[in-house]
Image (tube, rainbow, N blue to C red):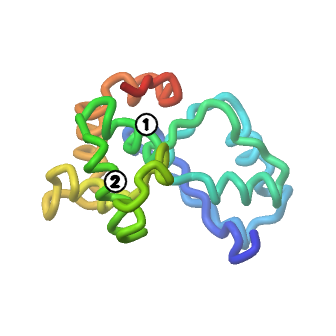
Amino acid sequence: MEDGALSLICVGTAFAQFVFLFDVVALTRYDLQPLLNFLGGKVMKVVWDGRMDFIELWSTYNISIGKNVCDLQVAEVLSRSNFRGEREDERLGRLATYFGSPVWKNPLQFAGIHRVVGLQQCLEENGYRGLVGKDRKSLFLRYWSMVLPGVVRSCDVFQLKSR
């Protein structure tokens, strides 16, 4: 990775009964191989914004995460219009907070572009300000079960259809 390197990998069970933290820097490739095989296998990976981690796993270890991935950041973006009723002017408003007035001057230039947010901002935007943080996993999982009921169970986010 050009601006950094993968240093920690955190793996946990579905409801965080067990969480394992791997210090990638301290371990040899030989030590990491069982974990890399696991990550490249058929087990479902649920992540928030996993793209840079997946790029690093591919470029450093030649491990393709490819299938069986549910990126909840992508699911959150898809849920805005599909489940939560976000209108086009609201989508453009999100973009305008970053790009400014060009969004309103030429909205067609921004067709199909969405602004992603971090996990904490997502929770706050959806009514959990002050009630929950990144580490409050049970409430987080209940939230996703309400917002994206089919996605949490199947993690088949790319089957969601836009309006």
User: In this picture, is 108 found above or below 133?
Assistant: above
Instruction: State how far apart marks 2 and 1 are (Cα).
Output: 35 Å
**Quadrant hosting residue 5:** bottom right
Quarter placement of the N terminus: bottom right
State left or right for residue 132 relative to residue 31.
left
Residue type highlighted by circle 1? Ala
Q: Using the image, tell me which numbered label, if any, was put on residue 14.
A: 1
State left or right for residue 73 relative to residue 93.
right
**Quadrant hosting residue 138:** top left
Residue 135 is at least partly visible in this image? no
Residue tagged 2: 92
Counting from the top left corner in percent of width and height, residue 143 is at 24, 40
Counting from the top left corner in percent of width and height, residue 53 is at 64, 57
**Residue at image point 44% right, 43% down:** 72
**Residue in front for this viewpoint, 104 or 30:** 104
Which element type, helix, strand or loop, lies under badge 1? Answer: loop
**Quadrant hosting residue 160:** top left
Residue 110 is at least partly visible in this image? yes
